[in-house]
Image (cartoon, coloured by chain):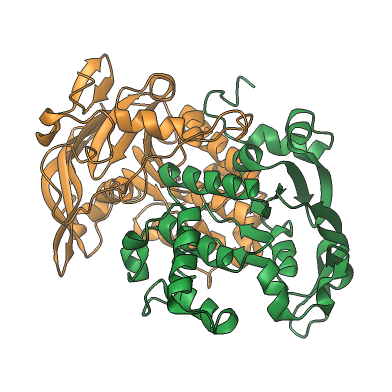
Amino acid sequence: MLKLDGVTKVYRIGAFGGQTMTAVDEAGFEIKPGEVVSLIGESGSGKSTIGKMVLRLLSPTAGTISIDGHDIKKMGKRDYYRKVQGVFQDPFSSYNPVFKADRVFGMIREVYFKGVPDKEWTAKIEAALDAVRLSPGAVLNKFPHQLSGGQLQRLLIARALLLDIEYLVADEIISMLDASTRIDVLNLLADLKLRGLGVLFITHDLALGNYISDRTVVLHKGRIVEYGPTDAVFEQPEHAYTRKLLASVPQLHTKWEDA
Amino acid sequence: MTLEVDDLRVYYRTLKGDVQALDGVSFGLKDGEILGLAGESGCGKTTLGKALIRLDGRMKHVGGSVTLDGETLPIGDDVRMNPYRFKQVSLIPQYSMSAMNPTRKIGRMVRELLESRREKLDLTELHHRLELVELPKDVLGKYPIELSGGMKQRMVMVISTLLNPSLLIADEITSALDVSTQKAVVTTLKGFRDRGFVKSMVFITHDISLTNQLADTIMVMYAGKLAEKAPAATVVNAPKHPYTQLLISSLPEVGVRYADKRLTGIPGNPPSLLNPVAGCRFRDRCPLAFDKCAEEPPPVEVEKDHVVACWKAA
């Protein structure tokens, strides 16, 4: 279980760092294996900051993040990244355009699987690609610009799966994809969840959060305003902010005037 | 009719040849009508929006015509198009955050802009419009950097419509905004139309749920061609083109859960527009495709105001 407890992040801003801004204020929630937790908030609500802290790209000012009771700060980074990996918003800037896209697999092999024979490694890659429903022939040995956004995002998820991770931080991973392909990536996350993966799904789109997640955390200005099972949050929102947010979502079959 | 677009073709020049981004699109727009232009990336919606106001250096006007209030717009000629811009055709840019001159106070920038068009600044009218979008008068004495993102967006909306253009083009103006700001922007745009600041509007977005909140008519494009055009309610509730049907059914809505109802996407990718195959451009991804799809389906009016380009729908 990945657990955040009283996590706070204060940024120093201004010319000489004289002022401070609290981006995340005492956030606490947990992700169990095999569960998708969505983190919903508007810009500046601190949702990506939380994602970065979980990925250890930032360190919290106060509070602890732990996995199964072990503080993540005390784990070696190499071990930690075998458990937790992230995928981000822009698939095109996640790759180096001058190298072939499958080089992301090679880099993993260099660090973690040096002694693995070629045959075993190929089988491992094929299994990972199969899990994200890509056919090896279509994506291996290609440059990033030859692949679509959806394929690139899936390759990144496959790369994370190679490490047999337990938790995945998915920060706005489908907001740059087209409507006809984004739903497939979303379904994929839901399938991985059935295999026991815990997913922190960060999004600004309430409909997507509602579709996929088991539990929902609503953030407003760095504070958690609502946290609970997704049905409860969406059907009986308790906080005024959640209600306002839900009322502003454009719905396909209802117009704002009629609501 | 305010706007008549007839068989418009705009290609992009590249080293490999012409990319046929907009390939024979025809439609009309009535007075007071808001047209929502929807489609995925690369479908030609932005190219169409740009073609109505300014072609950039790589774009080439290949054929077709645009008529606004009975006058043919010289869209292929950058210089001759100039008198029409801002007065007859205006644009709200996507990145309003960087649309204003950062070295001028906003009031001075607006005055200079109007002078360049040989127009006088009507200060009472400007104040009135600022009030409508809930901006205080003193924004005119501020630099753009002093405004928040939502305020800048509203300011740009006021400037774009100051000369009461006949046609307003809004290209993806809400994609960088939060949901609550999005709603405010869309409501303001509707208000502009109702008050007669703009006669008609083309609202370009990839988000069909949002278009439906605003538009009277929705036009769905696919790979540089018109797929379907109909009143907003018809497109959302009873689309006829297989592409529109699949697109609408792939949209998650609040209330739809993975566990209860599994949505599916559309397999495959849009075709390359460099040398597109003849015939229907959607046929490789279409579950209903048959022999006749090798010929290009013409847009047919199947019901009143409902145009579909598909052999199966006619």
Q: How many marks?
A: 0
The front one of B276 and B102 is: B276
The front one of A220 and B47 is: A220
Q: Residue at x 47, y 78 (%)?
A: A106
Q: Is residue B132 visible?
A: no
Q: Quadrant of residue A114?
A: bottom right
Query: In the figure, B261 relative to A52: above or below?
Result: above
x then y, percent, for residue B220: 33, 35
Q: Quadrant of residue B149?
A: bottom right
Left or right: residue B16 versus residue A202 is left
Please tell me the colour of chain B: orange
Query: In the figure, A168 relative to A224: above or below?
Result: below
Q: Is residue A105 visible?
A: yes
Q: Residue at x 69, y 80 (%)?
A: A78
Q: In the displayed image of the protein, which residue is found farthest to the top?
A: B303
The front one of A35 and A126 is: A126
Left or right: residue A140 versus residue B123 is left
The green-tinted chain is: A
x then y, percent, for residue B81: 22, 53
x then y, percent, for residue B103: 53, 73
Q: Quadrant of residue A213?
A: top right
State which quarter of the image contains the N terminus of chain B: top left
Query: In the figure, B138 relative to B305: above or below?
Result: below
The front one of B85 and B213 is: B213
